Image: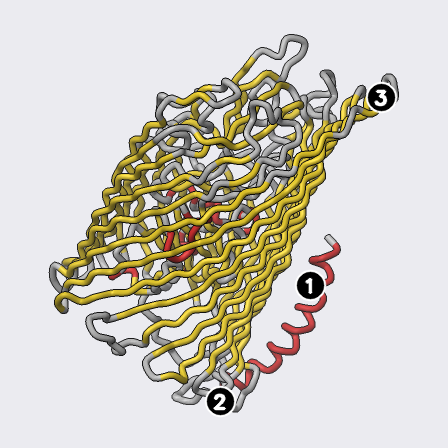
Amino acid sequence: MQLPNRILALIALTVTALVARAQPVRQSLGDGGTAADPTPVKLDTLRVTADLWAMPLARIPASVTVYDEAALRAGSVRHFGDLADQIPNLTWTGGTSRPRYLQIRGIGENSQFEGETPDSAVRFLVDDLDFTGLGTIASAFDVQQVEVLRGPQAGAFGANAAGGVVRLVTNAPTPFWTGRAEAGFGGDSLRTGGFAVGGPLVSARPEQLMMRVAVQQTNNDGFRRNLTLNEDTNARDEFTARLRLTWNPNDLWRWAAAVLAADFDNGYDEFALDNNGRYTYSDQPGFDTQESLAASLRGTYRGWDGVRFTTVTSGARTDSRYAYDDDWTAASYMGFSDLTRRRWVVNQELRLDSEPGATAGGISRWTLGAFYSDVDETTRYTDTDPDNIRGLKTAYHSANTALFGQLGHDFTPHTRLVAGLRVEQLEMDGNGTKTRYRAGPRTFDPVVVIRPSFDDTLVGGKLTLEHELGDHELAFVSLTRGYKAGGINIDARINPAVDPLTYGTETLWNWEAGMRGHWLDERLTGEFTAFYLQRQDTQVRDSAGFGGNYRFFTDNGDKSHGYGLEAAGSYALTKNWSVRGSLALMRSELESFTLANGNTGGGRDLANTPHYGYTLGTRYDAGRGFFGSAELIGRAEQFDSNNQNEARRAFRVVNASLGYAWSRWTFTLWAKNLLDETYDKRVYFFGNEDPDYLETRYENRADPRQVGGTVSYRF
């Protein structure tokens, strides 16, 4: 962990110097504020920031789930993966050390094996940093809120948001000093610690230059024991550091910068031929590591009459390694797959927004913008057994250029029409090189090289009609045209005579109708959305092979559709006691199809579309003294793939917490999967046992019961 050690040393020095300055700055706040009793600060209304127009949650005309900091703390959420099963119609696919591959309403990828390109249909952001397809690093420490927008987000994010958007919003710098220290322990040898501090860097002008830094380290054994090596080969070793700066040089400009560094040095050893879910037998255990360094800069200018200018620049580099024992034993064909990957992502957005109250004719609000994204990824893969060394090198490059706009028209003070349009030009190219060394004769097979390319012009947009039914209710209907961009297959092991080198763009039409509001003096809040999603030229990822020898590619199937309902609500029984719940219902169908290579699929539900999901919980919190919560989470069975018919089993999981808050201290005991439910996070169906390699169901079990405690101190 060389990267974190260097960063830790730098942050430790920075924090020491800054905390030393905290006392005089707090005392200068006045109004009775002291170091022990800082001036109370009124919290802003909960706002959704992942949409093109940020707005209060109560007024957004879309299907949205938001977990604020209080909800994250009450649920002892340490990672986004702790929430994934609770969010209506959001699913995730295992086979990695942390949830990385997300799907919303059945749209999204479930892997990125060797030769698979970095396409993704669910945008994943940490503030302005783009980690789409790289959700491993989604630590929830010092996170202000988690936002999930369901359905195509063509206007705001285009090609990489056909399913929706997930955004983690971290705590921003403040003009007064605050901080938090946390330590945790639990079953599976869990050990976690975090520290965050932020405040002004110029005591005379506290709002001119502000900062916040947060660091966290987590270790645990990974819920598996390798009996062949007598080691915890699935262990997690995870480090995250974030720095945010806000600079207000004058009344016209505001600048916000962020830096994130992460080093997740995790093992990956989870499958066994007997599906026991607890012990593994591999003699060459794998890895799932990710080192990321990312930065962003957002500038806002308000010097023009009625117009706000915003520029957002971000860049991220990620080095990862994903490796596993092909045969999962010490006594079979002895294969080991090792994939290293480097990805660069650079994004630039420029936009103009109307200021509140600056109307133009019949337009009450408008946005015009331009976006550019550049993705470069190179990979090197080897599959080694006693007789062969198979190799695959790939290079992938894509460039997206987009123009987008959105405007609103108020028919009346209570009724508004919103229209958005995005036009996106996509260009991508890549290459794949296949090699093979045969150990017996000591010869090399002929090298195979493929160089596919693809380009397309994509058009998406939306129409939304929203109406305020009263002072507390908002109803809306919307129609969105989204798209999943076509692309290239760069796995040089495919057969170009029958397997596609490129695949076409998938288009989506999404109809929604919903309502949200609050009643009984805001004791009761609720929302629901009904949707119908129609997909043309549905993209399907496919594979062919057996044992450790596979080829991967994407192709277009036929039409598909999905429809359902998403609802959530809460009710305050008393000032301190509340109940809450959510419900997701979904039906889907992928029409039967036959690919050019003869592979067939469809004729059933789409993958990652469970028929139902629900949460039911209760929480007691008086602000001081005892607090607690409990929740029941359930999901129906779901298919993991569109080309095989094995489904993950349905499950019901109970989580609970009990704690005590005293002064600035909080002590919490928590339990995940309290009743130790056995269920799956990934199911495969293929042949992996010699000598006959008969197709068999293999299960990757979700985490068993874990009980632990957390102590935190806020200042």
Q: Residue furthest right?
A: 442
Q: Residue at x 53, y 48 (%)?
A: 135
Q: Residue furthest bottom?
A: 204
Question: Which residue is more in the foreground, 4 or 320?
Answer: 320
Mark 3 sits on what residue? 439
- Earlier-in-chain disc, 3 versus 1: 1
Residue 376 pos. (x, y %): 63, 51
For marks 3 and 2, give the CA distance: 74 Å
Q: Residue at x 55, y 14 (%)?
A: 695
| Local crowd size for mark 1, using a 10 Å CA cut-off: few (<14), some (14–19), many (≥20) | some
Residue 450 pos. (x, y %): 66, 34
Amino acid bearing label 1 = Leu
- Earlier-in-chain disc, 1 versus 2: 1
Q: Nearer the viewer, mark 1 or mark 2?
A: 1
Q: Nearer the viewer, mark 3 or mark 2?
A: 3
Circle number at residue 445: none
Mark 2 sits on what residue? 28
Callout 3 secondary element: loop
Q: Residue at x 54, y 43 (%)?
A: 454
Q: Nearer the viewer, mark 3 or mark 1?
A: 3
Residue 401 pos. (x, y %): 49, 57
Question: Which residue is more in the foreground, 423 or 59?
Answer: 423
Circle number at residue 8: 1
| Local crowd size for mark 2, using a 10 Å CA cut-off: few (<14), some (14–19), many (≥20) | some
Amino acid bearing label 2 = Ser
User: Would you place residue 645 above or below residue 658 in this image?
Assistant: above
